[in-house]
Image (cartoon, rainbow, N blue to C red):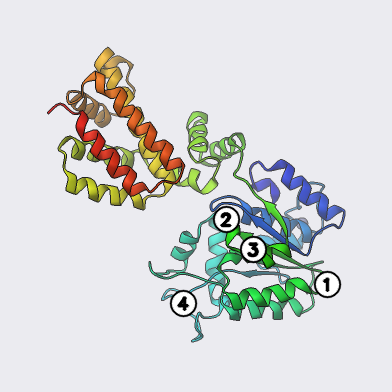
Amino acid sequence: MRFSQIPGHTLLKSQLCEAVRRSHVSHAQLFYGTEGSMQLAMAMAFATFINCENKSETDSCGQCASCRKMDKLAHPDFHFVFPIVKTKKIKTDDSASGSADAYMAAWRDFIQNTVYGSLAQWHEQIGAEKNQQAIIPADEARKIVQKISLKAYEGNYKIMLIWLPELMNVTSANAILKILEEPPAKTIFLLVSNDAPRLLPTIISRTVSLHIPNIGQEALTEFLQNQYQIPAQRAAELADLSGGNMLEAITLHNNTDEDLFENFSGWMRYCFKTDVINLVKLADQFEQMDRSNQKLLIDYGLGMYRNILLYKNAGESLIKLEAKELDFVRKFSKTIMDTKIEAITEQLSHTYYLLERNAKPKILFLDLSLQLTRYFIR
Ligand SMILES: [Zn+2]
């Protein structure tokens, strides 16, 4: 991972490079942000830059022996710790959680494909069951201490990256604390957290904290456009809906309009029929979607109601929709009075607003559904 592969964050990147050039790199740094942001990518690019043999002012070279090994996650002085849980998919020895080495191949796959990946995606990668929760067990923390006390093979620095230190138990955290207090020479710890408030204050106080915010709209738009060859307007929409969160933007991109139409049209049919049993089921189903997809569904609904209003007032000429969407608009517009569309739009917008403020989705969707049942002509 190189800095140039991460969109935006220009100032932050130059600060990190500057610290290396001035030899002001702290021995323990915490990269934190919300899940789906680029804190892991940033820590990886930083580690690559530190050990690059031919770095420029602003980035690692990507060509030298160190960069090539870093790229394959096979640098002997670059170590990882990440949460694990014993699963059928990963063959390990018989210890409580198995040895993290057995998870290394899965880890390489994970960060090479989705460096902004979530804990849920990591669980999926290692084949964890629904009720399983990966943690950083004490064994792993002890191994960190052992590995770190060995001499560096070839790099300038030994670097230990701990992904999701918030998932250490107390024993693990205490082992790490000791080594953070008295770190061996030329050793750097990079802690990468998705949930920094859960970290022990004693850990936070021993690190230099770096907040990695979501990517700026412009940089994310440009990245999405280039990465997925999508039109600028769509890319800007995804960047906006996701609030600059990389994981959310990509999830939204992968969520096809097909799903949206099916979800929305099915939902409206149940509202029309006041089918409360199915509306409750749907609210459950919508709750399972991640928040950006919930917002996308509402946003899609707002668009469809705009089209219904257009259709009622000006006919089909101004509407740009796919055939089945148009068919839905034609039929559905007969069930709603013009005067009710404003109220419906307000209800949808209000739900969107509350979703952004982390209200409970199941209650929101069910409440919205019950409100909507009042607006139809039957
Ligand atoms: Zn290099």
Residues at marks 3 and 1, CA–CA distance in whole angstroms:
26 Å
Mark 3 closeness class: few <14, some 14–19, many ≥20 residues within 10 Å:
few
Say which of 285 and 57 sits in front: 285
Q: Which residue is mark 1?
A: 185
Q: Residue furthest top?
A: 314
Secondary-structure class at tag 4: loop
Q: Are marks 3 and 1 in contact (CB under 8 Å)?
A: no
Q: Which residue is mark 2?
A: 115
Q: Which residue is mark 4?
A: 86
Q: Which residue is mark 3?
A: 72
Q: Is residue 167 above or below residue 174?
A: above
Q: Is residue 342 left or right of residue 95?
A: left
Residues at marks 3 and 2, CA–CA distance in whole angstroms:
13 Å
Q: Residue at the spot x=20%, y=28% of the render?
A: 332
**Of labels 4 and 3, the one closer to you:** 4
Type of amino acid under label 3:
Lys
Residue 63 % position (x, y): 74, 55
Q: Residue furthest left?
A: 378
Residues at marks 2 and 1, CA–CA distance in whole angstroms:
29 Å
Mark 2 closeness class: few <14, some 14–19, many ≥20 residues within 10 Å:
many
Q: Quadrant of ligand 1?
A: bottom right
Say which of 325 and 263 sits in front: 263
- Return the disc, 4 or 2, that comes first in the chain's sequence: 4
Occupied quadrant, residue 259: top left
Q: Are marks 4 and 3 in contact (CB under 8 Å)?
A: no
